[in-house]
């Protein structure tokens, strides 16, 4: 049983393989949080809650003259509104009578087998091998009759607990929901924790910042209409002295692609509250009597094995419980993308030439990027007109794809469905389909406007026009891009009083379009993109097996980017290509870096010389050999590229620990510096491994504890890969 209700203590214990989570129906039927951390089996943690008369922290009226019970000083599952808790709240609602209060008390609960579902939002799922149970708890405000249902799904073997929330208007007048957080995690004492977040910018996504908590509200957020380059909807709380290998680490990842807010508040008594949900900026959702609103899912994980342990939980979960695409299991093609090779300056002949050359590299698939449709010779026109430009693709799409297929290559295509150029037939026909505030001009970005995806007619146009192209030829890959942030929050299809719903309705509309295009094409490999990795979030990965990690293909920058991304996202999700950028870095090193990802090319293959072709061919072959280790193995960060050092290293180990791939990039060479040793991880200490093709056989213990010497008399920016294979019956050297 993963969820147990103790009828005497009124506690719910949520039990995974290595963690316990406990809550209790407490004083006055408030839902109290008792514990989240290493497994405690059926221990009752209610003794943890102490009550004192805390000055300036009020007491609920029905606690009578008991001055020791204040919500301001109690850990809760769903913090109320205006009930004496001055910390950040889970909800802000304007009731039908204009009052702003929510006093949620326990009403009922239900424990069931399997995973709960949300109506319009993407969620993770249970596979047939998972043992999953759901707990639903209903809270109600006795006056307004507003009801809140808290959802918890416990993935026992994978050590993940998911949360979501539903608000229902059980009253008789319309209410306005202005803030709804999907999950709250209260710690009785959180002074010893660090907060790790993943800020960035265009071209430098998901860098890593770690800070000691101080007494204020730390916020991680996006108000750009998408999950953004600037922050990622993910945070880690860890022991102040936690390392990659040791220490308690809590993760919270938000399955949502729009505005989000995570608040981390260390309060006056060192209590710690973490909230995660849709950002309340310009959010005002009207609910008529009987209507409900669902808040997106949060994936919580706990590991006592440090940051690597936490990453492994998420990587495994993302690889099995997030995306239903067959490409999560089947081998994906190695692709070449035309963007950096030709930008928008290509025609059918040029594409066939690139495909011919790419084929010699061992590439499987050619992706025709931006520029193939409408009138699109630069980024000032054409978006929205999803019809093939026959001035460029003179032979037509189907014939072009056949020519590419005849070379033994597959074909993929680029779209940016959510956008429109003012210079396009679509805009001329439907100027009211863009997001633009009446009487004002919309903000342009990359000279394009945003289509109003809250509208059904816009959604249906996109579903129809994209599907038509996808079905018109043998297309096996689609890159789905979005190249600006969202502004001008207004929909011509909604009345003035519902404009506070636009941000969220846009995201719901997008999910509907994605569902109708992606889920109806199970044989197409979809890759997400947003000016690189601007909307690389867990919800997007329920649709796409992979995401273009960044437009920045400089290998040394990529080392940091891949490192930061790897805290949450598996390597198999990171789109990474070899390009012509950083000419001083050898082609081989670029390939090694791209193998920390989906691996592919982003260059003009027709310009490569014979030596370069040979290097590329060797690299594609190696990638295919290492594919199972990279895509399905356990990934270890061996160095931190944000710290000064001479090299960056990482490795992947197969689940059965029979093989591993160690990658090293020399980023700096100290003249006459010390010999350095790389301490490997995740190997079986007792087994022996052959290192590379040398006759060197070493024990896992030696490789992990004594380390592997990294040759230092090598050119700067060179790289090394060490393939380790467990061998039996071979005498060990050490
Ligand atoms: C974005 C993407 C690029 C490329 C261009 C095309 O910037 O990230 O990879 O597709 O758009 O306009």
Image (cartoon, rainbow, N blue to C red):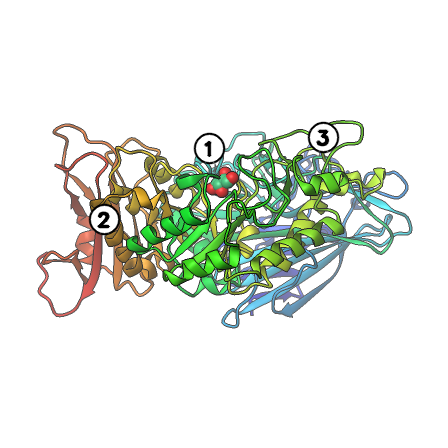
Residue ID for mark 3 = 56
Nearest the viewer among 143 and 398 is 398
Q: Position of residue 233 (x, y in %)?
A: 55, 43
Q: Is the residue indicated by label 2 positioned so its CB lies within 8 Å of ligand 1?
A: no
Q: CA distance from mark 2 to mark 1?
A: 43 Å
Name the quadrant containing residue 580: top left
Residue ID for mark 2 = 615
What SS does tag 3 mark? loop
Instruction: Indicate the quadrant containing the C terminus: top left, top right, bottom left or bottom right.
Output: bottom left
What SS does tag 2 mark? helix
Q: Nearer the viewer, mark 3 or mark 2?
A: 2
Q: Is residue 604 left or right of residue 315?
A: left
Q: Is residue 612 left or right of residue 543?
A: left
Nearest the viewer among 516 and 175 is 516
Image height of 74 relative to 445, above or below:
below
Q: Position of residue 541 (x, y in %)?
A: 53, 53
Q: Is residue 188 left or right of residue 59?
A: left
Q: Are marks 1 and 3 in contact (CB under 8 Å)?
A: no
Instruction: Indicate the quadrant containing the N terminus: top left, top right, bottom left or bottom right.
Output: bottom right
**First in residue order: circle 2 vs circle 1:** 1
Q: Give residue 211's mark.
A: 1
């Amino acid at each position: 049983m993963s969820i147990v209700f103790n009828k005497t203590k009124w506690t719910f214990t949520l039990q995974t393989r290595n963690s316990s989570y406990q809550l209790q129906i407490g004083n006055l039927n408030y839902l109290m949080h008792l514990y989240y951390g290493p497994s405690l089996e059926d221990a009752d943690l209610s003794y943890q809650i102490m009550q004192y008369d805390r000055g300036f922290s009020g007491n609920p009226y029905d606690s009578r003259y008991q001055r020791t019970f204040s919500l301001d000083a109690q850990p809760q599952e769903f913090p109320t509104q205006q009930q004496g808790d001055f910390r950040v709240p889970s909800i802000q609602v304007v009731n039908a009578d204009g009052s702003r209060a929510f006093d949620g008390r326990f009403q009922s609960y239900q424990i069931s087998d399997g995973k709960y579902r949300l109506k319009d939002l993407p969620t993770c799922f249970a596979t047939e091998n998972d043992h999953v149970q759901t707990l639903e708890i209903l809270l109600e405000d006795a006056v307004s009759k507003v009801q809140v249902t808290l959802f918890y799904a416990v993935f026992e073997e994978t050590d993940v607990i998911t949360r979501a929330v539903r608000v229902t208007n059980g009253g008789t007048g319309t209410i306005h929901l202005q803030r709804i957080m999907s999950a709250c995690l209260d710690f009785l004492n959180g002074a010893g924790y660090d907060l790790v977040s993943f800020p960035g910018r265009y071209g430098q996504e998901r860098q890593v910042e770690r800070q000691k908590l101080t007494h204020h509200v730390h916020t991680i957020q996006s108000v750009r209409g998408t999950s953004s380059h600037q922050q990622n909807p993910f945070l880690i709380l860890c022991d102040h002295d936690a390392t990659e290998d040791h220490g308690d680490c809590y993760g919270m990842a938000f399955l949502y692609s729009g505005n989000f807010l995570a608040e981390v508040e260390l309060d006056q008594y060192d209590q710690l509250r973490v909230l995660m949900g849709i950002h309340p900026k310009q959010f005002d959702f009207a609910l008529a009597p009987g209507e409900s609103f669902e808040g997106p899912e949060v994936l919580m994980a706990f590991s006592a094995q440090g940051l690597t342990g936490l990453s492994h939980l998420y990587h495994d979960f993302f690889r099995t419980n997030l995306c239903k695409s067959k490409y999560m299991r089947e081998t994906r093609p190695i692709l070449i993308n035309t963007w950096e090779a030709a930008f928008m300056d290509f025609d059918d002949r040029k594409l066939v030439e690139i495909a011919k050359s790419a084929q010699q590299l061992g590439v499987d698939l050619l992706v025709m990027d931006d520029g193939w449709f409408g009138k699109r010779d630069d980024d000032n026109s054409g978006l929205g007109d999803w019809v093939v430009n026959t001035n460029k693709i003179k032979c037509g799409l189907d014939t072009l794809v056949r020519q590419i297929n005849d070379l033994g290559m597959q074909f993929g295509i680029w779209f940016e469905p959510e956008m429109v150029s003012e210079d396009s037939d679509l805009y001329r026909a439907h100027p009211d389909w863009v997001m633009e505030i009446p009487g004002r001009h919309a903000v342009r970005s990359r000279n394009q406007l945003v289509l109003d995806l809250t509208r059904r007619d816009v959604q249906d146009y996109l579903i129809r026009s994209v599907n038509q192209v996808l079905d018109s030829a043998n297309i096996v890959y689609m890159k789905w891009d979005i190249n600006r942030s969202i502004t001008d929050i207004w929909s011509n299809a909604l009345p003035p009083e519902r404009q506070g719903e636009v941000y969220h309705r846009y995201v719901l509309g997008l999910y509907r379009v994605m569902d109708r295009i992606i889920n109806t094409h199970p044989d197409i490999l979809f890759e997400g993109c947003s000016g690189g990795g601007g909307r690389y979030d867990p919800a997007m990965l329920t649709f796409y097996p992979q995401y273009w990690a960044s437009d920045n293909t400089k290998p040394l920058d990529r080392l940091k980017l891949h490192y930061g991304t790897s805290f949450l996202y598996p390597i198999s999700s990171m789109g990474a290509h070899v390009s012509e950028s950083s000419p001083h870095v050898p082609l081989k090193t670029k390939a090694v870096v791209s193998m920390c990802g989906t691996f592919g090319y982003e260059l003009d293959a027709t310009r490569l010389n014979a030596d370069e072709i040979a290097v590329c061919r060797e690299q594609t072959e190696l990638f295919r050999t290492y594919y199972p280790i990279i895509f399905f193995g356990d990934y270890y960060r061996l160095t931190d590229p944000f710290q000064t050092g001479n090299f960056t290293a990482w490795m992947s180990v197969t689940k059965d620990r029979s093989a591993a791939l160690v990658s090293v990039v020399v980023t700096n060479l100290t003249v006459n510096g010390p010999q350095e040793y790389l301490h490997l991880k995740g190997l079986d200490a007792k087994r022996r491994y052959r290192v590379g093709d040398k006759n060197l056989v070493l024990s896992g213990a030696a490789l992990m504890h004594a380390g592997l010497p990294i040759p230092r008399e090598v050119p700067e920016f060179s790289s090394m890969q060490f393939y380790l294979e467990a061998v039996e019956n071979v005498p060990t050297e050490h």
